Image (tube, grey):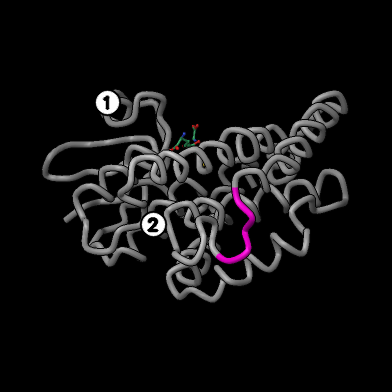
Amino acid sequence: MLKLCGFAASNYYNKVKFALLEKGVPFEEVVVWPDTSEAFLAKTPLGKIPYIETDEGVVSESEPICEYIETVYREVPLLPSEPMARAKARELIQFVELYLEWEARRLYSEAFFGGKVSDDIKQIVAKRLNQALAALPRLTPLTHFALGERFSLVDCALAVHLPTVGFATKLIYGHDIMSTPLISDYLARLAARPALQKVLADRKESVEELVRRRTGS
Ligand SMILES: N[C@@H](CCC(=O)N[C@@H](CS)C(=O)NCC(=O)O)C(=O)O
């Protein structure tokens, strides 16, 4: 059986998990906390999670993982089959991961783990996040699901990334940049899905463990 390896506090892990649950793929979760052993780095070169283990081999990085799952388990598709529509879906996921999640990560050490981020970095990140947020409607109107009437892998990504980015901005700037009526309504639609409810419920304990590990408390 496919093994999903990592920890459930991770947005990237949860994107893959949400997709597996929505697709009805049988899988086993293996809790792995990153270390520096050669055995671990052989599976995931920079020591990042998630990765999957299958009979065919190991794959790290959530996007190729999702692509593999989508190709092998075709019964419930989460990406359009038409090439341009599929590319546009991937474009949207990459946009959110590079320009929102990855940018906001520069705030996480202070927002979640008791560290300190300089005012200069906070200013730069705020500017870039606001630029990306203003650009988001050019990629999706978010009026139902991200790609329209049909739930997709894009929703799996947005469901995990947007709230965390929003929460971090609230803690750092005192204002959740994701709390626009459009995004709030969209996230409420996703929150009604049992698969996402399970992902978020499973996440709680792992977040506590991650904070313990990062703060030493
Ligand atoms: N681009 C990667 C990002 C994965 C990532 O950043 N994972 C974090 C957890 S959310 C991680 O493994 N951090 C541990 C580390 O960097 O040591 C993906 O899409 O899977």
| Residue at x 12% of width, y 40% of height | 56
Q: Is residue 73 left or right of residue 205?
A: left
Task: Please name the amino acid that badge 1 sits on.
Answer: Ala
Label 2 crowding class (10 Å Cα cut-off): few <14, some 14-19, many 20+? many
Depicted 128 relative to depicted 152: above or below? above
Callout 1: 10 Å neighbours few (<14), some, many (20+)? few
Q: What's the magenta region?
A: 140-144
Query: Residue 74's x, y, as percent?
Result: 22, 57
Residue 184 is situated, as x and y percent measured from the top left of the image, at 71, 65
Report the amino acid beneath label 2. Answer: Lys
Q: In the rendering, which numbered label is found on residue 42? A: 1
**Do callouts 1 and 2 mark residues in contact (Cβ within 8 Å)?**
no
The numbered dot on residue 50 is none
Q: Which percent across, then down, holds residue 53? A: 22, 43
**Res. 61 image quadrant:** top left
The structure residue drawn at horizontal position 79% and vertical position 50%, both measured from the top left corner, is 177
Residue linked to disc 2: 17
Secondary element type, mark 1: helix
Q: Which callout, 1 or 2, points to the residue nearer the camera?
A: 2
Vertical side of 173 occupied by 125: above or below: above
